[in-house]
Image (tube, rainbow, N blue to C red):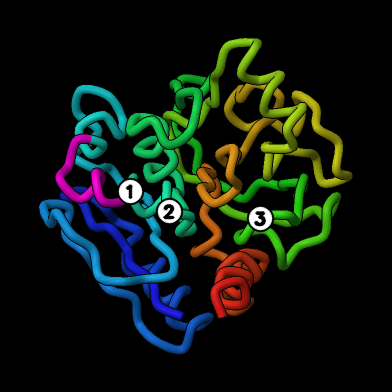
Amino acid sequence: MSAAVIVFPGSNCDRDVAVALEAALGRPPAMVWHRESTLPRVDAIVVPGGFAYGDYLRCGAMAAQSPVMAEVKRRAAAGVPVLGICNGFQVLTEAGLLPGALMHNASLSFICRDVDLRVETAGTPFTAGYTPGQTIRLPVAHNEGNYFADPDTLMALEDEGRVAFRYVTPAGEASAAGNPNGSRHNIAGIVNAAGNVLGLMPHPERAVDAALGGSDGAAMFQALALVAA
């Protein structure tokens, strides 16, 4: 299996994602600069976290217009798995690959800590390594992670099983106590209608080695490797 990581000016988690992908796939991913208009033939694409274009104008808005994103959209439409993490999630919503928007955290402050998540579905290329209802722990680091969508969109996401991860308490309860940023329905990650595009705010690439504080994110990259094998 092969993968590509899209790199924007301001990306700061691209190398972390590359390390996680190489550990799972056995080969380093292609690092693709945002100004490229083509992509190599790959089995998965990751839009990493960071501050693309310094988050000027609106998080992800400028990055969504980068030349490479037209090709990312084409690959996504063809069924290639596309993973957007944190700023990558923001880019995917701005590019129209996922519905909704990421707004300022309800606290109006930057959040950087570990959070508990409940896996809501195992039926995607990214979550196949987890069990529905399983609680995992991943770090977050964002200022605009408050997921918002209109009521009809939220209902569709719920009815179609497209909420992939939800913020919860350590006991697994999706309540205000477990919601770090005010996201509607405690949403931490969603998939598109086809299930091959995932956006999530927590950072699985920062939790792939117990020596670094946790390994709950490793299963996401391992699942990608198995699905594409």
For the view shown, which residue lies furthest in the top direction? 151
Nearer to us of marks 3 and 1 is 1
In percent of the image, x 67 and y 65: which residue is there? 216
Read off the residue under disc 3.
124
Q: Where is residue 111 in the image (x, y as percent from the top left)?
A: 50, 37
Task: Give the structural element (helix, strand or loop) at label 2.
Answer: loop
Which label number is shown at residue 106? none
In percent of the image, x 46 and y 44: which residue is there? 141
- Magenta: main secondary structure equals helix
31 sits to left or right of 46: left
> Which residue range is magenta in the image?
65-72
Query: Spatial distance from mark 3 to mark 1, Cα to Cα?
Result: 19 Å
In the displayed structure, 10 sits above or below 24; it is above
Instruction: Decide which of 173, 153 is in the foreground and name it.
Output: 153
In the displayed structure, 48 sits above or below 21; it is above
In the displayed structure, 102 sits above or below 205; it is above
- Tag 1: amino acid: Arg
Read off the residue under disc 1.
74
Q: How crowded is mark 2: few (under 14 residues within 10 Å), some or many (20 or more)?
A: few
Query: Spatial distance from mark 2 to mark 1, Cα to Cα?
Result: 6 Å
- Tag 2: amino acid: Ala
- Tag 3: amino acid: Thr
Task: Give the structural element (helix, strand or loop) at label 3.
Answer: loop
Which label number is shown at residue 78? 2
